[in-house]
Image: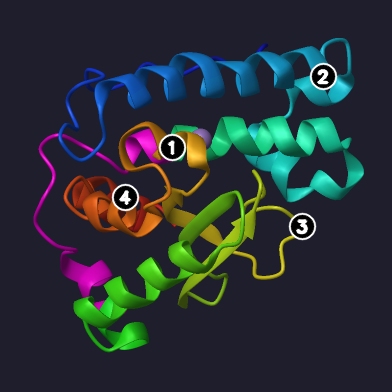
């Protein structure tokens, strides 16, 4: 069974003006599609091809660099499209809201720390909100297409929110102004999806 590029839940222009339609289209149809195709090509004919993507990532040190990069790219973007929505807005709810207050003080402090991690990631990579095995919420960041599920990650946990800070995610609209892109992202975060990710942990 090959991995499939998941359908987008919204149109390319649905996140305007925060994320422009051309960036969305290229990001999804070129970048994400390429990670998916390359992952399938790398796994083709191997027994590991039947493993789940989570299982592959959790044992990524046993795989090739190409599977690490493309498997990460496949998983990370699957999550990224889901944590954004044109009907975004609102705030974390219920247990997630309580956990954010517990581990970060309040929502504003959480927002500041997450934005800081995204801003400071040197070069290409991601910022994450993860749930560690002990239930702790942590903000972290990984280079390239790595993620906190990977056994090689410095800080491990289940990602429930991810922000892509590769230049391909913002350069057409924001050029070098990554901070503006990060600030715009807060307008399209789909907290319902993140509440759900947190509950299913
Ligand atoms: Mn990307």
Residue under pointer 1 = 169
1 or 3: mark nearer the eye: 1
Q: Quadrant of residue 63?
A: top right
Q: Which residues are magenta?
A: 80-99
Q: In the visual, does 155 lie left or right of 141?
A: right
In the rendered image, the residue lying farthest to the front is: 176
- Residue pictured at 36% horizontal, 51% vertical: 197
Q: CA distance from mark 4 to mark 2?
A: 33 Å
> Dot 2 lies on which element?
helix
Residue 3 visible in the picture:
no
109 left or right of 46? left
Distance between the alpha carbons at the discs numbered 1 and 2: 25 Å
**Of the two numbered discs 4 and 3 in the rendering, the one whose residue sits closer to the viewer:** 4
Quadrant in the picture for residue 83: top left
From the viewer's perspective, is the residue at label 4 or at label 2 nearer?
A: 4
Above or below: residue 46 compared with residue 63: above
Who comes first in sequence, dot 1 or dot 2? 2
Question: How far across and how far down the image is residue 117, in percent?
Answer: 47, 69
Ligand 1 under 8 Å from disc 1 Cβ? yes
Mark sitting earlier along the chain (4/2): 2
Write the residue at 34% across / 25% down: 24
Q: Which residue is mark 4?
A: 181
**Residue tagged by mark 2?**
42
The location of residue 59, given as percent across then percent down, is 80, 47
> Gap between marks 2 and 3, in whole Å?
20 Å
């Amino acid at each position: 069974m090959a991995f499939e590029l998941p359908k987008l839940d919204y149109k390319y222009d649905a996140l305007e003006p925060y994320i422009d339609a051309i960036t969305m289209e290229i990001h999804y149809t070129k970048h994400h599609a390429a990670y998916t195709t390359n992952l399938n090509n790398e796994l083709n004919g191997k027994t590991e091809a039947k493993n789940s993507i989570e299982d592959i990532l959790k044992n990524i040190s046993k795989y090739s660099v190409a599977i690490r990069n493309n498997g990460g790219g496949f998983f990370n973007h699957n999550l990224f499209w889901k944590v954004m929505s044109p009907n975004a807005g609102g705030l974390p709810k219920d247990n997630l809201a309580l956990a954010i207050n517990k581990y970060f003080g309040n929502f504003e402090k959480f927002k500041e720390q997450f934005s800081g991690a995204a801003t400071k990631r040197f070069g290409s990579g991601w910022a994450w909100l993860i749930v560690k095995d002990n239930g702790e919420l942590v903000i972290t960041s990984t280079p390239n297409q790595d993620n906190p599920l990977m056994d090689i990650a410095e800080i491990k946990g289940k990602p429930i929110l991810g922000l892509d800070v590769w230049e391909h995610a913002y350069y057409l609209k924001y050029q070098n102004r990554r901070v503006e892109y990060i600030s715009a992202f807060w307008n399209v975060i789909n907290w319902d999806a993140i509440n759900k990710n947190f509950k299913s942990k």
